Image: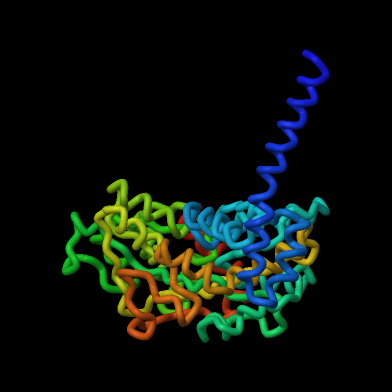
Amino acid sequence: MTDLTKRGLLGGTAALAAAAILPARNAAAQAAQDLPAHERPLYEAAQREGELTWYTGQLQAEPSEAVGRAFTERYPGVRCNVVRTTSQVAFQRLSQDARARVAQCDVFSSTDYSHFTFLKGEGRLMPYKPENAAGMVKGARDAADPDGHFQITYLALYLIARRSDRLSEAEAPKSWRELTDPKWRDKLAVGHPGFSGAIGNWAIMMRAAYGEEFFKQLERNRPQIGRSAGDPVTTLNSGERLVGVGIPSAATLFSMSRGNPLALIYPTDGTLMVPSPSAAIANAPKPNAAKLFMEFVTGDAYSRTIRQYYAESLRPNVPPPEGARPLDEIKLITPTPQQIQNEMTEVKELWRDTFGV
C-alpha cells in the first residue's frame, strides 16, 4: 500500500469519526438550550463525567430501563447504568460497597423508607434538594427528608389482584383479613419482606391491624412466597395461583395492558401506599450526574415515563395512569417513618419464624 493510499485511508477514518462526533455534540448543545436554567450547569458538569450508576428496587426491570433511557435522551452524553434488583438486595449491595470501601453507586432508590433514615444517620447521603421537587404532588413533598437528603420518587400502591378468568369479582376476597379464610388455601401468592421493602411495609400494617395471629392464619393457607412484591404478577399470569397479595398496582395494570386476565381489588380495609425515596450517595463517583438524576426523577419527564408503565404520577400536570382509581377515591393506609424504622426488623423476623423462609 502506498503512503498516499495510507494517508487517504487515515484521513477518511478521521473524517468519519468527526462526522460521528458532530451530531452528538449538536444534540447535547440543543438539549442544554432546552433545559431550565437551574439544570444547565449540572448538565455541563455531568457531561464531563459521562455516566452514573443507579441502584434501584422501586420499579420493575422494564420500566427501570425505560427511565434510564429517558434520562439519557433528555441529557445526551450522560449514560444511566441501571442496576435493578429488589430493594433489600439493592441495599445489601450498597452496604457491601461501603464495607469494601468501593464507590460504585451514584443514586440509590428503594421501597424501604428505613434504608434512608439509616443511611442519613450514617452520613452516607448527599444533602441535595432538587429544585424540581418544589413542583411535585403534596404526598411526595410531605414525605421527603426536610433536610434534603432524600426525595420521594415513587408513590406505590399495593393491593390485591385476581385471575379474572378463573375468579369472579363476587367470589374474590374484598379485604386483607379475608385472605386468612381457609378457602384460599393454595391459591395465594405474595412477596417476602426480607427482600421487598413494600411487603415489609404491608406486614407492619397487617400486624398493627390484626396482630401476629394474622400471619399464622395466612401461613396455614400455604401462600406461594416469592421475593419482589411484583413476583405474584408472574405467578398469576402463569396460572399457578389465583390471588396476588400485596401486589403493585403499576405492575398489575401493565400486565393487564398486555392482555393478561388480571383485575385489581382495592381492599376495604385499606390500600397500602408506600412513599419510596431516592437519594444521591455522599461518595458518589459521579456527583454532578447524581444531582442531575435527582432533578430528573423529581421532574415532569420522569413522571411521563413511569406513567407509561402505570406508575402513579408525581407531578400535578401529568395525569394518573389509565385504569387506576384516583387517589382521593381510595382508602389508603401507610406506616409512619417511625413505624418503619422501629418495626421493620421485627416483622422480617416474625415472617421468617412463621413461614420458615
x 68%, y 67%: residue: 292
x 51%, y 83%: residue: 137
Q: Quadrant of residue 297?
A: bottom right
Residue 236 vertical position relative to residue 13 in the rendered view, above or below: below
Res. 134 in view: yes
Total tally of numbered discs in the picture: 0
Q: How is the image coloured?
A: rainbow
Q: Please state which of residues 204 and 349 is positioned toward the viewer in this rendering.
A: 204
Among all residues in the image, which is located at the extreme front? 4
x 67%, y 43%: residue: 19
Q: Please state which of residues 146 and 132 is positioned toward the viewer in this rendering.
A: 132
Where is residue 127 shown, x and y percent of the image?
Answer: 75, 75
Where is residue 72 shown, x and y percent of the image?
Answer: 61, 57
The quadrant in which the N terminus is found is top right
207 displayed left or right of 162: right
Residue 261 vertical position relative to residue 325 in the rendered view, above or below: above
Q: Please state which of residues 63 and 171 is positioned toward the viewer in this rendering.
A: 63
Q: Quadrant of residue 133?
A: bottom right
Residue 127 vertical position relative to residue 179 in the rendered view, above or below: below
Where is residue 353 shown, x and y percent of the image?
Answer: 52, 59
x 74%, y 61%: residue: 46
Among all residues in the image, which is located at the extreme top? 1
Res. 216 in view: no
Where is residue 335 shown, x and y percent of the image?
Answer: 52, 79
116 displayed left or right of 240: right
Q: Quadrant of residue 172?
A: bottom left
Q: Please state which of residues 239 and 207 is positioned toward the viewer in this rendering.
A: 239
